Structures are given as C-alpha cells and as structure tokens.
Amino acid sequence: MRSKLLAVAIAAGLGVVSFHVAAEPAQAKKVAKPAAQAESSKNAEIEALKAQLAELQAKVAQLEERTDAQSDINVSTGQNVEAVQKAQAASDKKVSSVEKFVNNTKISGTMFFDLTNANHKEHTANGMQEKDGHGSVNGVGYDVKRFYLSVDHTFDDVWSANLTTDFNYQSTLSQTSLFVKKAYVQGKFDPLFTVRFGAADMPWIPFVEKWYGYRFLENTITDRSIDGGRGTVGVAPQGVGSFGNSSDWGLHALGATAGDNAINYQLSVVNGRGFRNPSRSQSVDVEGRFGYQPIEQMVIAVGGYSGKRGNDVQNGAPTQNATRGDLLVAYRDKTFGVGAEYFNAKNWDDVLKNNVPTAVVNRDKAEGYSVFGDWSFAPQWALFARYDHVEYKYWANTGPHNELKDTYYNAGVSYDVLKNFKLAFAYKYDKMEGPTVNFPYKTNEIGFWGLLTY
C-alpha cells in the first residue's frame, strides 16, 4: 500500500515537470525571453516541485504511521475480542453446568409434629395409678416426631442418588437426634428392575404406609413399638419394640407396573440392624414383598423376613433365625380408603438363644392385625379411625411361657390446611395386659397432630 502511494506521488511530480519542459519551447516561440530569465524561472519551478514532493512524502509517511498504528489497534482489539469470547464461553459453560446441576437436583422435606396431652397409668401395689413410664410422660407436650430432609439428584436417565436425614425431638426424652435415614445410589434399568445400593426403604413398612395414609399420626402395626411389657419382676421392662425396620443398609431390587392388573415387588438383602446401625454381621437378612393390583385402587400384598437381625457376629452368642410373615389388603381412591394388615413373627426379640448362661433356649412368638379407614366427607375434611391388636408370647429361662396383649386404637378428624399441610385432631388409646403386676399399663392421649411437606 505504501509503495503504491509513493509511486503515484513520484509519477505525479514527474508528470508536472515533463509538462513544463514540453510547454517551454512553445512559449519561447510566442515570446522571446532572455536565457537567464528562463533558466531562473525553470529552477524556481523545480524547487517548488521538490518542496511539494517533500511535503507529499511527509504526508505519505504520516499516513503510513497512522496505518501501522491502526493495524496494531486492530490486532489488539481482535485479541481482546477473542479473549472476551473465550471467557464468555467458559462462563457460559460454568453457568450451564450449575444450571444443569440445579435442574437435576430436588430438595424436599417432611415433618411430623404434635401438641397433645397424655395420661399414662400403670399397675402398682395400690392398683392402676398415674405414673410416668414405658416411654410416656404425663401432661402436655410438643414433639417433632420426625423431620426428613431429602436431596435427590439425577445423573442421567438411569442413575440417580438420594440422601435423607432424619431429625426428631421428643419431649418424653428431652433430647434431639439426627441421623441418616436413607443414602443410596439407584440404577433404574426398567420399570420392573431398579437397583439401590446403600440405606434405602425396606419392602414392607414404607409400602404399607402409603396405603394407610396417616403415618404422621401413628406408625403402622409392624413399626409401632409396644413400650414395656416384657421383663423380669423387679427389673425394668425390656419392651417388645417394633417388628421391622423401615430402612436398612444393603442391596435392594424393586419394580412395578401401573394401572389395572399391575404387579409390584421388592427384594432386599440387608445387614439387619436398621438404618441407625450399619454394623457388620457374619450373615445377611432378607426381606421381600410381592403385590398385585386387580384394579389401580386396590392392592393385595404378601411379604416376609428372615435373618439374624445383625446379631450373628464373630465370637458372639449362639443365634437363631428371626422370621416374620405379612399380609395387606387395601383400597384407596380420592375420597375413601380402607385396609387390613396382618403379621406373625417368631424369635424377633430372642435371636440370641440364651440371655443367661443356661441350656434353656429363649423363644418368642407374636401375631397381630390392624384395620384402618378414612373418608373425605367434604373438601379438605376427612374422618379416620384405626384398631390394632397384638398378642405376644415369650418363654423365659425360669418357666413356662408368658403372654402379653396390646390393644390400640385411634380416631379423629383431619383438615387439609394447604395442599402440603395437614392437621388432625385425634384421640389415642393404648392398653397393655401382662402376666405380672409390674407391666400392665393404659395410656390415653388427645391433641393435634400435623404433617408438613415441601
């Protein structure tokens, strides 16, 4: 570019000189001038032309400097634009990653709470008298029975993960607890084949809870602890406890179809001590369930459990299998629900054959049933009731079997304050009848129970 401009300038200068030289003879013919004057005029024109040429060269040089400077600016600007574009691309990638993580992650919570008044009476030497004990404290109290905080993350169409923490406060114990309820990785390969690794829902209790619908008010019959009842005279009652775990550590396989004539199943191979105690054992426990739905609103399900409940440890005491059988028949639609659950269990508390150094084998046997129902008689309003009966027999080292009977029922009305907020006003009754004067008791409780989810 610079060479072209310089050539044009020189050519222009030479053209002007040639024009003057060619025109000079013609003018000499018209007007005769002295030789000295003509020579002087020619020199002046040449000098003027040189000055113009020098000025033109200076302007060309300035133009070249400006062009070079502009070229440097353009290069620098291009580099800056490229750097900004790269930074923007990196930022967009980070934003996209964060957005993808947020979109694939769900945080939810569930809280069970109550405000009630309890009246607990136990059999003493002076008859049935009001007394704190067997997990009950008399008077008014506020409890947060459960607060579940869950994080679900989806990696792709197959793999996902779940972490659920469980917090609870009980005024009867004056303490709070926080622990992991569920922590698993899931691979969903087909609607009929999903695998979970870690602490996850067991096959029976969570399944029944969904058909029952009022877990926030009371545990299902196999999950409801019967405080007190079993023990030795003069010794604090050991209690019967629940007959199952709602979550445990292990490997879980499950699947289901939808609609009428649907099936569902779950098989879990677990440690046996429940989600609060992920300890090791010499053997594993197995729990399973199979359900059939002739219509979408109805289910018939059977289940079972077998194992050492985590007690088969190295150098430990001799053990025997704990077993449990389950049956559920339930119906639920938008306004009405009804169901019945039955279970029987053997050696659930006496997995260890001997509680004392003796050859006599300890044994226990339990069976029970629960019937429940609810009816939405108006928008947001429902009536509900439930009745449980459990018979528990155990053979002590010192004699024949003893028998405990537990009768429980509740009834009330619930109101859906919001879609995810339910309140219930209810009455509960629980009565334990035992073989000795130390263990029978009766508890009446009335108040408000609530469920909040988000």
Image: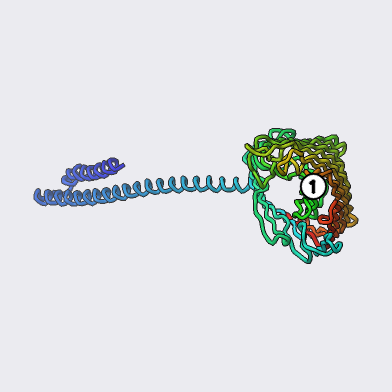
Q: Which residue lies most toward the bottom here?
A: 139
Horizontal and vertical percent position of residue 325: 81, 38
Q: Is residue 157 left or right of residue 12?
A: right
Count every numbered label the image shows and give the total: 1
Say few, some or many: other residues with alpha carbon within 10 Å of mark 1 (under 14 / 14 to 19 / 20 or more): some
- What is the quadrant of the N terminus in the image? top left
Hey, which quadrant is residue 135 in on the image?
Answer: bottom right
Of 39 and 198, which appears nearest the observer? 198
Which residue was labeled with disc 1? 209
**Residue at image coords 80%, 48%:** 220
Q: Is residue 43 left or right of residue 244?
A: left
Q: Is residue 238 left or right of residue 158?
A: right
Figure coloring: rainbow
Hey, which quadrant is residue 410 in on the image?
Answer: bottom right
**Residue at image coords 86%, 62%:** 128
Horizontal and vertical percent position of residue 293: 85, 37
- What is the quadrant of the C terminus in the image? bottom right
Of 401 and 440, which appears nearest the observer? 401
Of 78 and 304, which appears nearest the observer? 304
What amino acid type is highlighted by mark number 1?
Glu
Of 10 and 121, which appears nearest the observer? 121
Whether 356 is drawn above or below 432: the answer is above
Whether 219 is drawn above or below 303: the answer is below
Task: Look at the image and tell me whether residue 85 can be seen.
Answer: yes
Q: Which residue lies most toward the right here?
A: 377
What secondary structure is marked by label 1? helix
Task: Look at the image and tell me whether residue 296 can be seen.
Answer: no
Horizontal and vertical percent position of residue 188: 68, 36
Horizontal and vertical percent position of residue 383: 88, 56
